[in-house]
Image (spheres, rainbow, N blue to C red):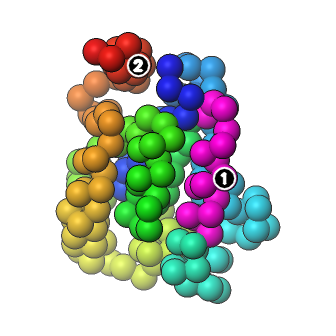
Amino acid sequence: MESRIYMIGYMGAGKTTIGRRLASMVRYPFIDLDQYIETAHGTSVTDIFLDRGEEYFRVLEQRYLKKVTHLQQAVIACGGGTPCFYDNLEVMLKSGLVIYLKQSINVLHQRLIHQQMQRPLLMGMDESQLAAFINQNVTRREQFYLQAHLIFEPEKETLEQLVDRLSLFNKGG
């Protein structure tokens, strides 16, 4: 089994929830990169965005991503934008197995409509603005997401099937 497994995908895709379950199944520690940053800085990602802006957050995100590449074993849930900035995707692809957690636009919309206050990029949007924003951003970011080693679609397969695919992947199959 690859020593580091990175979960990437759009916000609301379930990277933290599925990442935790996957980590439990493969007996690896779980790290949520956003929570890792919050713990290190003593403040929330939302507050970092609001106080210092997205650019500042992306620099922090890159720094802490590089720190977790030194862990021996871990399942790491990355933020939705993590693979889209700087050399982050290249770092992940070279230091572990990258899994794109692909959800439909409809699923993302249904989840994110209830999470807008916790998501700095979504605050203040009405339902149609949110739908357009999600669609536009998923379309733009998918060029990064699709470079992952594996694509996992929870609407089409189970987590057990993903674990089986991981075993095959690691055997070169």
Q: Which mark is residue 41?
A: none
Task: Give the x, y percent position of residue 77.
Answer: 53, 46
- Report helix, strand or loop for mark 2: helix
Task: Name the residue type under label 1.
Answer: Lys
The spot of residue 116 in percent (x, y) is 46, 69
As measured in the structure, the alpha-carbon distance from the residue carrying label 1 to the one carrying label 2 is: 24 Å
Any magenta on residue 34? no
- Residue that mark 1 sits on: 67
- Is 83 placed left or right of 130 in the picture? right
Q: Is residue 53 above or below residue 102?
A: below
Q: Is residue 16 left or right of residue 104?
A: right
The residues colored magenta run: 60-74
Q: Is residue 152 above or below residue 127?
A: above
Instruction: Identify the residue shown where x is 41% and y is 44%.
Output: 93
**Number of other residues with Cα within 10 Å of mark 2, as a class: few under 14, some 14 to 19, many 20 or more:** few
Residue at image x 30%, y 56%? 144
> What is the number of callouts on the image?
2
* Residue 101 visible here: no
Residue at image coords 33%, 17%:
172
**In the image, is residue 11 above or below residue 32?**
below
